[in-house]
Image (tube, rainbow, N blue to C red):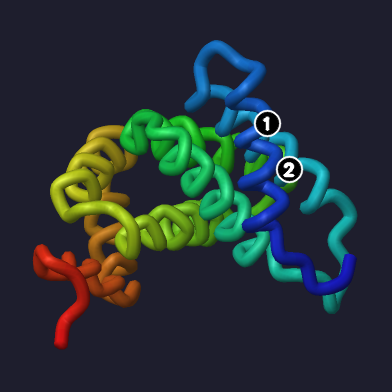
Amino acid sequence: MDELRLVQLTKEMVAEELRLMGDPCAAAANVVRKTLMAALQGAAPGDTPPARVIEDAVKGAMTALLLADQSLTRGAILVVEAVMDAASKRDLDPTESMRAALKGLADLRRFVDPARIDDIRLEIESHYMGAGEAFMELLRSVPVAPRPVAAPRGGLLR
């Protein structure tokens, strides 16, 4: 498998599943699980590192959930559970897999207000002891996108 970027592919697959499924967060997690099981099967030297595959799949799924205005907190937990399940079945290091998943989740910081990020952190910590702090460390490394400033009423600045 050559260098592989799964962000766009996973986002499109999750968006399609969301249109067809009843529980969008569960559908997103299922797509992540299937994607990782396929992408991590028989990896060879020189292939995309598993951590990168996991991070990209998580980013794609969470971006799709964000665009569909779904619960990012619920989605994050279900997606992390899917990652851990796939990592276990592919004999990947659980700590590295969790870190890659958290890194993918931390990318949300660019698009989501701090209160929602904190909700995700608290939920992660309640399910995975110590993972909330690891998530916070990763959040510090993600640049914050500047918030757009509304133009004054009456048109363009002069």
| Among the two numbered marks 1 and 2 on one chain, the one whose residue lies closer to the N terminus | 1
Q: Residue furthest left?
A: 153
x then y, percent, for residue 21: 61, 16
Locate the C terminus and report the quarter of the image it occupies: bottom left
Q: Which residue is found at the position 17% from the left and 54% from the top? A: 114
Residue denoted by label 1: 16
User: Where, by quadrant of the figure, is residue 4 drawn?
Assistant: bottom right
x then y, percent, for residue 70: 39, 30
Residue denoted by label 2: 35
Is 156 on the left or on the right of 69, as rendered? left
Q: Assign a secondary structure to mark 2.
A: helix
Q: Could you tell me the amino acid type at mark 1?
A: Glu
Task: Identify whether 2 is placed above or below 96.
Answer: below
User: Where, by quadrant of the figure, is residue 156 drawn?
Assistant: bottom left
Q: Could you tell me the amino acid type at mark 2?
A: Thr
Q: Assign a secondary structure to mark 1.
A: helix
